[in-house]
């Protein structure tokens, strides 16, 4: 083990220079330190703080390393000088080949652009056809809704015995007329459980009246889905208005009869008010109740 010792005052300084093997000399710089992809000079210099080396010595060592690399590069070029010369000779006349490649590339680019234009045109055509299909499907659905609307209006007119200009009351089939009367008044088999009123009159059938209200509400739903400003629906408004007024008249009659229903008064009144609410005719219900109180 090397030991460091300072001599006595009477010893000469030359004694320290005779055996310099114990001094901490820095190791040579490694080439691998400069090959890192993220090499940073500042980081590299900050890592040399423990080399016990002056800045001038570090500069000298870096210059020596640079000179060594330059000599190695020069030797490499001298060893492969003939290859460098042959490379320059091989590059002569390459302009024609480059021009040929350029022409082929431009032709390929035009072909690709032509195919791209065809694909874009086809895409637009398919998109237009799909839009047309959606439009036709929407129109078909609208047509079905309009036919359903007309059938339901006609059905309600027959059930409520509403005669229009083209159909008089005597033109309504007998089975439809009897069915309509049984729908409005409790003489049908479906309402055999309902009792007569105190004055002996047959009460309005709430079950059939509820079906009429449901059919009318469904008409409103169809009109909202199709659009209330549709010409066909505008043409049907007079017929629908008659249906509405007839249903409201039946509801008014049922509400008046509910006030004389005895023990079932509250239940029948709430049932009729619920039908008013289904139609969205709360104001009509309030007006009818006020008239009953008077």
Image (cartoon, rainbow, N blue to C red):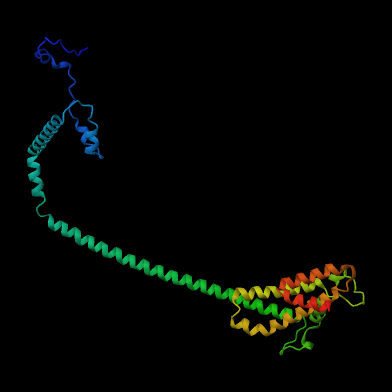
Q: Residue at x 15, y 56 (%)?
A: 97
Q: Residue at x 80, y 77 (%)?
A: 290
Left-right relation of 274 to 117:
right
Q: Quadrant of the C terminus?
A: bottom right
The answer to which of 259 and 19 lies nearer the viewer is 19
Instruction: Let me know if residue 159 appears in the view.
Output: no
Instruction: Let me know if residue 266 appears in the view.
Output: yes
Instruction: Establish if 87 lies above or below 218.
Output: above
The answer to which of 219 and 275 lies nearer the viewer is 275
Q: Residue at x 16, y 28 (%)?
A: 54
Q: Tell me where residue 171 sits by quadrant.
A: bottom right
Q: Position of residue 291 (x, y in %)?
A: 81, 79
The answer to which of 118 and 81 lies nearer the viewer is 81
Q: Position of residue 223 (x, y in %)?
A: 63, 76
Q: Residue reaching furthest front?
A: 9
Instruction: Establish if 28 lies above or below 15.
Output: below
Q: Position of residue 31 (x, y in %)?
A: 19, 32
Q: Quadrant of the N terminus?
A: top left
Q: Tell me where residue 51 sits by quadrant.
A: top left
Left-right relation of 280 to 25:
right
Left-right relation of 124 to 61:
right
Left-right relation of 265 to 77:
right
Q: Position of residue 194 (x, y in %)?
A: 87, 70
């Amino acid at each position: 083990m090397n030991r460091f010792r300072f001599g006595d005052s009477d010893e000469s300084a030359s004694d320290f220079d005779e055996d310099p093997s114990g001094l901490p000399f820095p190791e040579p710089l490694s080439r691998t330190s400069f090959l890192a992809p993220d090499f940073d000079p500042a980081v590299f210099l900050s890592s040399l703080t423990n080399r016990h080396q002056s800045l001038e010595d570090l500069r000298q060592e870096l210059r020596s390393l640079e000179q060594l690399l330059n000599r190695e590069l020069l030797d490499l070029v001298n060893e492969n000088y003939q290859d460098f010369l042959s490379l320059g000779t091989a590059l002569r006349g390459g302009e024609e080949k480059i021009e040929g490649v350029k022409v082929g590339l431009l032709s390929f680019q035009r072909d690709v652009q032509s195919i791209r234009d065809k694909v874009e045109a086809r895409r637009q055509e398919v998109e237009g056809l799909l839009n047309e299909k959606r439009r036709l499907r929407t129109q078909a659905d609208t047509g079905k809704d309009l036919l359903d609307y007309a059938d339901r209006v006609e059905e309600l007119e027959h059930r409520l015995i509403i005669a229009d200009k083209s159909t008089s009351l005597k033109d309504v089939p007998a089975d439809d007329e009897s069915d309509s009367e049984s729908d409005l008044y409790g003489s049908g088999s479906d309402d055999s459980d309902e009792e007569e009123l105190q004055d002996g009159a047959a009460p309005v059938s709430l079950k059939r009246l509820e079906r009429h209200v449901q059919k009318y509400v469904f008409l409103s739903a169809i009109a909202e889905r199709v659009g209330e400003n549709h010409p066909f629906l505008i043409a049907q408004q007079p017929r629908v208005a008659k249906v509405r007024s007839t249903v409201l008249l039946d509801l008014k009659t049922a509400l008046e009869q509910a006030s004389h229903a005895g023990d079932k008064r509250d239940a029948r009144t709430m049932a009729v008010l619920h039908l008013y609410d289904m139609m969205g005719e709360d104001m009509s219900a309030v007006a009818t109740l006020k008239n009953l109180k008077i």
